């Protein structure tokens, strides 16, 4: 059976005048602030136009930690085990550089210098991926790196994370890992790394504290083998297993989405 995603403009118009069109779309399909979205059954005669609750909000995990703390490595394992869709803020920014987009040169200069790209740019890239994805469960890696990142995501995307992972790793271990990373990254050198560590301490700590106070932070000791560390990650997702299994694939931009029933 197939469903057609209906326009929600009439149901959310009064409360969403200040929202962007994209935000309304995202909220409509994933129900981020209304926590439910709606679809029109077109297959039942006589019920055309009837709006019914459909999708739950997407499941979002933010992945925090200093440079080289093992975020990307652990994300790969989480994806394998729980099927979340991995969105790396750093990878999205590097893609802009590789594609020589309008912001590419500016992003390259900031990354080379270990600085943070303006939140609006990063959040828009994430928003595009979230909106066009067929998934409804996401691992957002390397984001938010600052309070400004966090607030911009809330404002533009309108969603809160369900889980925030923090890979806690001593500086000397992070330096060692980054200098051995061998991925040809412009920021994997000792000069940039020192700047990145300073920026991490100054700007990421407040974000960590924010989620700690909200009871959403899971701190992981990031020293040990990849498998040892994953052993700490696994039980964090266990309580959400049913929710993650039920998360259906839906694309808010697609006119037709498959019904799970
Ligand atoms: N537990 C670990 N022990 C040793 N090296 C690791 C571990 N986890 C990851 N690495 C290596 O450290 C480097 C940085 O890991 P990565 O996952 O890219 O970190 P991040 O995304 O936090 O910068 C990579 O070369 C990776 O293979
Ligand atoms: N939210 C983000 C994420 C990354 N970045 C930039 O991208 C660089 C690389 O980020 P990354 O997440 O790939 O780095 P790692 O922590 O994986 O080493 C950062 O040092 C910043 O310059 C950013 O500005 N804002
Ligand atoms: Mg990474």
Image: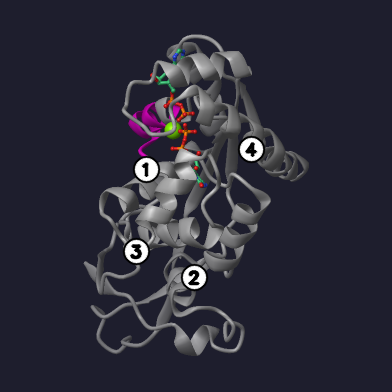
Q: Which residue is mark 4?
A: 199
Residue 159 x, y percent position in the rendering: 56, 60
Q: Is residue 73 magenta?
A: no
Residue 34 numbered mark, or none: none
In the rendered structure, the answer to whether residue 161 lies left or right of residue 177 reads right
Q: Nearer the viewer, mark 2 or mark 4?
A: 4
Q: Which residue is mark 3?
A: 102
Q: Nearer the viewer, mark 3 or mark 2?
A: 3
Residue 44 x, y percent position in the rendering: 26, 80
Q: Nearer the viewer, mark 4 or mark 1?
A: 4
- Range covered by the magenta-colored residues: 74-83
Q: Secondary structure at mark 3?
A: loop
Residue 91 numbered mark, or none: 1
Q: Residue furthest right?
A: 213
Is residue 53 visible in the rendered image? The answer is no
Q: Are there few (<14), some (14-19), or many (20+) residues within 10 Å of tag 3?
A: few
Is residue 123 visible in the rendered image? The answer is yes
- Quadrant of the drawing holding the C terminus: bottom left
């Amino acid at each position: 059976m197939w469903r057609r995603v209906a326009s929600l403009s009439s149901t959310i118009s009064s409360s969403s005048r200040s929202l962007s069109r994209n935000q309304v779309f995202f909220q409509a399909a994933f129900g981020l602030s209304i926590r439910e979205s709606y679809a029109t059954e077109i297959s039942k005669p006589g019920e055309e136009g009837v709006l019914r609750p459909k999708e739950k909000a997407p499941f979002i995990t933010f992945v925090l930690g200093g440079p080289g703390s093992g975020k990307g490595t652990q994300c790969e394992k989480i994806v394998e085990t729980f099927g979340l869709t991995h969105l790396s803020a750093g990878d999205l920014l590097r893609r802009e550089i590789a594609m020589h987009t309008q912001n590419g040169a500016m992003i390259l200069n900031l990354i080379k210098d270990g600085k943070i790209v303006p939140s609006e740019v990063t959040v828009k890239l994430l928003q595009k991926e979230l909106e066009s994805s067929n998934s409804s469960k996401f691992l957002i890696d390397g984001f938010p790196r600052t309070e400004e990142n966090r607030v911009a995501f809330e404002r533009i995307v309108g969603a809160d994370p369900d889980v925030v992972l923090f890979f806690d790793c001593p500086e000397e271990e992070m330096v060692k890992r980054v200098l051995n990373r061998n991925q040809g990254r412009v920021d994997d050198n000792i000069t940039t790394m020192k700047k990145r560590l300073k920026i991490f301490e100054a700007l990421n700590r407040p974000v960590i504290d924010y989620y700690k106070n909200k009871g959403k932070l899971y701190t992981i000791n990031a020293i040990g083998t990849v498998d040892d560390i994953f052993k700490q990650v696994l039980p964090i997702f266990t309580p959400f297993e049913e929710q993650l299994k039920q998360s259906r694939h839906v694309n808010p931009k697609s006119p037709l989405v498959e019904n799970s029933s």
